[in-house]
Image (cartoon, rainbow, N blue to C red):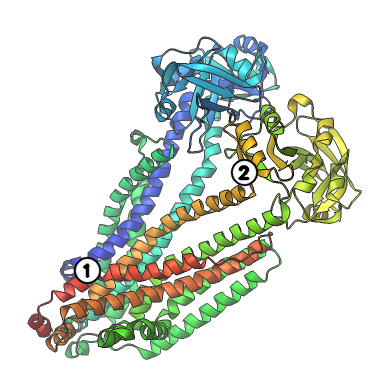
Amino acid sequence: MKTSMRNFFAHKGRMALSAVAVLLSVAFVCGTLVFTDTMNTTFDKLFAATSSDVTVSAKDSSDTGETTSDNGKPPVIPAAVVDEVRGAAGVKSAEGTVVSTSVTVVDGDKDSLSPTSGGPTIVGSWNANDARTMKITSGAAPEGPDQIMVDADTADKHGLEPGDEIGVITVVGTHTAKVSGIADFTVTNPGAAIFYLDTKTAQRVLVGESGVYTNVNVTAAGGVSDAQLKKNVVTALGGDYKVQTAEETAEANQKDVEGFMNVMKYAMLGFAGIAFLVGIFLIINTFSMLVAQRTREIGLMRAIGSSRKQVNRSVLVEALLLGIIGSVLGAGAGVGLAVGLMKLMGLAGMDLSTDDLTVAWTTPAIGLFLGVVVTVLAAYLPARRAGRISPMAALRDAGTPADARAGRIRGGIGLVLTAAGGAALYLAGSADKATDGSMWLGLGVVLSLIGFVVVGPVLASGVVRVLGAVLLRAFGPVGRMAERNALRNPRRTGATGAALMIGLALVACLSVVGSSMVASATEELDKSVGTDFIIQSDSGQLITPQAVEAVRGASGVDRVTEYKWTEADFTTPDGKTLKDTAITAADPTYATDLRVETVAGKLADAYRPGSMSVHEDFAKDHGISVGSKIEIAFKDGGTGALTVRAITSSEAVVDAGAMYTSIDTLAKYVPADRMPLDMLLFVSAKDGQQEAAYKALKDGLHDYPQYTVRDQTDYKEALKDQIGQLLNMIYGLLALAIVVAVLGVVNTLALSVVERTREIGLMRAIGLSRRQLRRMIRMESVVIALFGALLGLGLGMGWGATAQQLLALEGLKVLDIPWPTITGVFIGSAFVGLFAALVPAFRAGRMNVLNAIATD
C-alpha cells in the first residue's frame, strides 16, 4: 500500500489526465441520471398538483386526458352529468370544465404564442381546481367573452401585459380577447403555454356549443378516499363515462412522458458508455507506460523479495485510487452538468426549476461503481505485465523488449475478428429484409470495431510509414525522427489512435446515413410528388376548414387536394380483425399529386365510391387481391365493405404503408360533425403562376401562423435541416468521447516525453534546437491523430454504407458519401493532434540539457 501511494503521487500529473477521463465519463452518467430524475420529479409534482380527487371525462377520451380529436374538437360530456355527480355519496363539490389542446394562440401581430420547446398550448375554462395551482399575480380572472388570462411564463417570454390583444384559433373559428390577468404556477411549469377563458366563452370557442364539458372535477368530502369516491361516482353514472382518481390521472400522464424520457435517458447513457470505452484505452496506455518506465524499479522490488501478486496488487491499488478519486469528482461534476442541462433546456423553452433537483443515493453509487470497476479492469493487463517482470530486469536498462510472439498472436486474432466483422457487414448488406440485416449489421459493427482495436498495432506500422512519407519527410531529419517515435511502440500508437478512432467512426457512419437519407428522400420527392406546394403544421396541428377555404381562395391556385387520416377496425378476407388500423382519405387528385407505384390495379380506381387500396405486404399477409372486400368499422362512424381496387408497392418512401380511400367514401360512413380534419393540403398552381400562387398562399394564411406553405425546394430544405439538427445533437454528445480521446493523446505524449528524457537531452546536446524538438513532438502527435482518423473514418464509412443498404430495402436507395464532412473531420484531426501536443512539447522544450542527460 505504501509503495502504491508513493507511486501514485509521484506521477500525479499523469494520473490527473487519466482521472479527468474517468471524471468526464462518470459525470455524464451521473448528470444524465440526475437530469432525468429531476424531470420525473417535476412532472410528478405537476400532475399530482393539477389532478382533482376524481375526474370524469368522455368514454372515448384518452387515459392522459388528451383534449384533441380527429375533428379538432375535444370529446365532450353533457352538462347534466355535473348534477348527477353532485348527487353521488361522498362528493363535496363538482365543477364542469372545458379544455382543448387543438388550438393556436397568436398575439396582435399574428405571431404564434406556442412554446418553442414542443410543449402543448392549452386553452381552458378558469375553475376552482386551477385556482389551487395558479396564483393570479397581475389583473384578474376572465369574466366575459372579451377577456383571457395567460400564464406568467408565456407572458414573460412574449412580453404580454394586461390589455394586450390575443387571438384564439380553433376549428370553430377565431376568437379575439384582451389579457385580463396573468397567473403564475405554484409548481414548476415544464413548458406549456396556458390560457384561460370564462366557462361560457370556452364552450363556445373550443367546442362550438353550450351545455357541454370536457371534464368534471370532483372533490371528496372529508374522510372519503379517492378510491371510494370513484366507486360512488361510477355507481351514480354507470359505465358510460371515464372516471379516474387523482393517482390514476397522474400515473397516466406520467406514462405519456415516460417514453420520451426513457429515449433521452438511454441515448445519453449510451454516449457515456462510448466515453467510458475511449477512457479505457487512455487508462491502459497510462499504466502500460508507467509500468514500462518503472521496469528497473519493479525488478529491484522482485529482487528483494516482492512476489508477483504483490507487484500486481500494487499497480491495481494505484488504479483503485485513480478510480475512486475520478469517480467522486465525477459524481459531483455530474450534478453540475445536470444543472447546466436544465439551464440549456430553459433556453430551449422547457423550464425546469433547480428547486426540484433530485439526487437519488443510487446515482453517485452507480457512478462510483462504474468508475472504479472500469478503471481497475483497464489496469488489469498492465498490472499482470508488471507482475511478470523478473528480478533480472533490474540489471537492464529501463523498458522491456516487445514480445514478438505475443504481437503475432494479437495480429492474428485482430485479423480474424476484422474478417468476421467484414463478413457480417457483407451479410447485412445482402439481406433481403431490413430486420434480418440489422442483426448482422450490429454484429459486424462490434466485431470490426474490436478487430481494428486489436489489430491496431499491426496497422500502425504500415499506416504511420505511409503518413510519414506523405507528410513528414518534407521536414527532413526532424520529420523522420517524429515518424520513428510514432513507430517505436506500435502497441502504444495503436491504442492511442484507437481511442480517437471510435468517436470518429461513429461520426463518419452517422454522416453517411444522414446524407444518404436526405439524398434518397430528395430523389423520391422529385420522382413521386407532382404538386407545387405542401401545406402543413410543423407542430402537428390539424388544418381547420377556415384555413382550407383561405387556401382555395388564393389567386393562381389550380387545385387543392385534401388529405385526412383516421383509424378503423379492418376485417380481412382471411377472417382476421385488425384493431385501430390507419386509413388515409384524400381527394381523387391525390393520385396525380403523389405518384405511387402500384403492383396491381390503378391507384385512381381506389378513389371510386366504396373503393380503397392496400399496400403489397398487407395484401400478402391477408390473402388480398384486386377485387377483394374488406369490412371496415370506421372510428366515430359506421361500418361498410370496401372493394380493393389497387395494391401499392411497399417500397415507397413517401406515404410508406398507406392505405387509401376517397374523402367521399369516408363521408358516407362518418357523420359530418365527426369527420377528421386535414393533416396536409397539396396545392397545384396554374401554369406559369407558381410564384404568384406561392405569395398568395402565404398572404392567405397570414391569419393562421400555425401552418407553413412550402414548395418542393422548401420541403427538401426542411427535411435536410431536421436531419442536420439531429446529427448535430449526436455530434455534440460524441464530442465527450473525442475530448477523452484527446486527453489520451496528451497523456501518451507526456509519458513518452518522460520516457525519452535522456534521449531528448542527448539530441539537444548534439544540436537539436528547442524549436525543432517541439516541432518533432507536434508532428508525432499529428501522425498519431491522423492514424486514428484514417481508421475511424474508413471504418465508419463502411458501417454507413452497409446501413444504407438496409435503408434501401425501405426505399432509401441513394448512397451519398458526404466528402466535405469527411474531409473536414480528417483535417480537423490534424489540428486535434497539434492541440494535444502543445503542453508536452512545451515541457520537453524547457528541459535542462545536462539534467536530462544525467537521468537514469
Q: Is residue 77 visible in the rendered structure shown here?
A: yes
Report the residue marked by disc 2: 710
Q: Is residue 659 visible in the rendered structure shown here?
A: no
The quarter of the displayed image where residue 199 is located: top right
- Comparing 703 with 598, the one in front is 703
Image location of residue 523, percent across then percent down: 66, 59
Q: Amino acid at mark 1?
A: Val
- Disc number for residue 839: 1
Mark 1 residue element: helix
Q: Residues within 10 Å of mark 2 (few under 14, many from 20)?
A: many
Q: Residues within 10 Å of mark 1 (few under 14, many from 20)?
A: some
- Comparing 490 with 781, the one in front is 781
Q: Is residue 542 above or below residue 295?
A: above
The quarter of the displayed image where residue 498 is located: bottom left
Image location of residue 285, percent across then percent down: 31, 73
Label 1, label 2: how far apart the Cα atoms are: 52 Å
